Amino acid sequence: MASLNTLRTKYGIVLSVVIALVLVAFILGDQLSMRGRGNAQITDNVVLTIDGTEVKQSEYAKYVQEYAMEGVNPDYTAQAVYHRIAFDKYLHPAYEAAGLGFVASDEEAMFVEYTNNILNNDPTALSMEKADFENAIAYNWEQMKAMSGGIDVSTTLVKATNTYAAGKFANSLEVEEALRNENLTFDGHYVMLPYAAITAEEATKAETDAYAEAHRKENPNFGARTIAYVRFDIEASEEDKVAAEEAIMKANEAVKAANGDVKAIKSAIRGVDGKVGNYVAVSSLSEAEAKAIKAGENYGPVLEGDTWNAKYIVKKVSAPESFTFSAITTESPLAADKLVEEIKAVNGNLAEIEAGANATTETVKMAALTERDAEKFLNAKVGDVFTHTVNNKPAVVKITELGKKDNFVLTANVEYTVKASNETYDKIVADSKKLLAEAGKKPETFNEAASKIGKFPMNRVVSRGTNPAQAFHSVSGIEDSRNLAIWTYDAEVGDTKSWTSKNVIYVCMVTAINNDKYVVSDERLAKREVEKDKKFAVAKNTLAMDASIEGMKSGKFNGVNFTSVAAGEANDPIFVGAIARSTKSGEPTFVKGNAGVYLFVVDNINNTEAAKAGVEEKRKEMNEAAKADVNRNFENYMMDGVQVVDKRGASEL
């Protein structure tokens, strides 16, 4: 199994590039589940519509259950489930209509390609036993199938993208453009006048508004909602902090009174979340902790942030940092005790016993031992035999090697975080409910209700795109707010909602809705663009290659091509792009760049013969990088223009 990790990494990546959109489905969090709801309360609402096909809540829940894996952010889970539903409801029927649907032979062909990739590229695979190699391949193949959300998704996508890729360079104009961009380079010289050095009329309000209006389509709007929200932080009150300090100091006095009695120390700190830990090397402690322990003193209690910390010395020892031993596991503690006696009877000679037993060599760190286990090892010598638990089984161990000695300390530790008491929590919840009850249906009444309890509402604009799979939904300033954002999409002015996330309760109201088809550009940006246009017009009348203008810069460029990021000292993509689009030499060309106005002349266009090579001779299939790019974006191409209505958030809350 030597190349198992390789199969999971290198060729896992190779396969993911081939199949592209890995549709992994994960478990939705409690906010997305239907737990805690009585059957009488459940309404089987439509939660997702794709190209007119509706998905009800019950069907959506089945998708979640079928493609669920634990331990992942609910946003990723919701995204993955969306991808799978989009495939089933829209993409797969479209593929089948084009003759690209899934058949059993697709998986066989894909498995052969996967195996051949490994045999051709991984030298370690060739050295493996045949049975080991086949087992490793089979195991990893099943893992990849599970991760992809179904082999039908993977193979269908491969067929579709390969079909797309095969025709990518069929258009001769595309080939000519590709050849030109690949081969041509440009040499020349330029002058540049920074915008700061150009005097022009300031943009008027009318001109700025006209520019913004003309560029509205650059900023599509899908019913952006403005919400006001109030935060109720669930945090300790001053009374809670005083009570916590009193509890810590009371425990501290009890520890002092215990006078080293371990049971009494444990009892003293139990009420403030204290417990005895493992032995730790003194050198691993913080500087302040080590200073106190070395002096034989307890550390703390000290308030660090919102947590009281203390370390009370239970025992200080000098011991090996590690213990290496032979271990023989048994079926029961009684069997282990009996085996210890047998080994001691032959003076610790394991040779006869190991012949019929499953003996292993193990090493344990002193710092990994519990208080109880450490007592067995503290004074152990090479050759000592005793019982111990190995891999959760009773075992007999014989010490074979000791690590170098170090100083260790066993401490009773307190890490007591000051939290809101039940009384404080109830008061915070009551205030949030009061605001929700008195918010009314107007922004004015919401603000008044917040003011009465000493709160100041914050405002945020919540926008969405055409495709709900393109970006995570969130409300700026509110953590884990995906479902809250989706709720706003269909909410009306005056609608309210309470939302809890990470020890904060939010009470929100939709205060405005922008139903314009497009959002006007930022006024400052619009003004800047208008003034750039005016300065460009002025510069075209004054700037020349031989001009002498204060602030003007000049330079040369060599070897600029389609992929260049700079032309000489000019690092301006607009300017570089203009050079790469040139078709003739010797012609002065003006460019409205990012930093200023450029005037350039191409002196030489190089490699023209290579760029004129016959299209048919140079036609080629897409390279792997280009295919990978197509794969990553293919679903977006297929879903472009498809009407998607996502109401999952409103139904899942």
Image (cartoon, grey):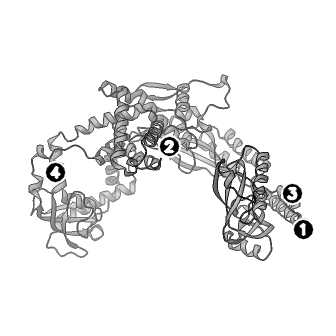
Give yes or no for contact between labels 3 and 2 (Cβ–Cβ under 8 Å).
Answer: no
Residue that badge 2 annotates: 473
Earlier in the chain: of badge 1 and badge 3, it is 1
At 30% from the left and 69% from the top, the residue drawn is 196
Q: Is residue 302 above or below residue 521?
A: below
Amino acid at pointer 2: His
Residue that badge 1 annotates: 259
* Neighbourhood count class around disc 4 (C-alpha, 10 Å): few under 14, some 14–19, many 20 upward: many
Earlier in the chain: of badge 1 and badge 4, it is 4
At 16% from the left and 73% from the top, the residue drawn is 547
Assign a secondary structure to mark 3: helix
Earlier in the chain: of badge 4 and badge 3, it is 4
Kindly identify which numbered label has been placed on residue 179: 4
Amino acid at pointer 1: Asn
Residue 641 visible in rendering? no
Q: Is 566 left or right of 107, judged from the image as shown? A: left
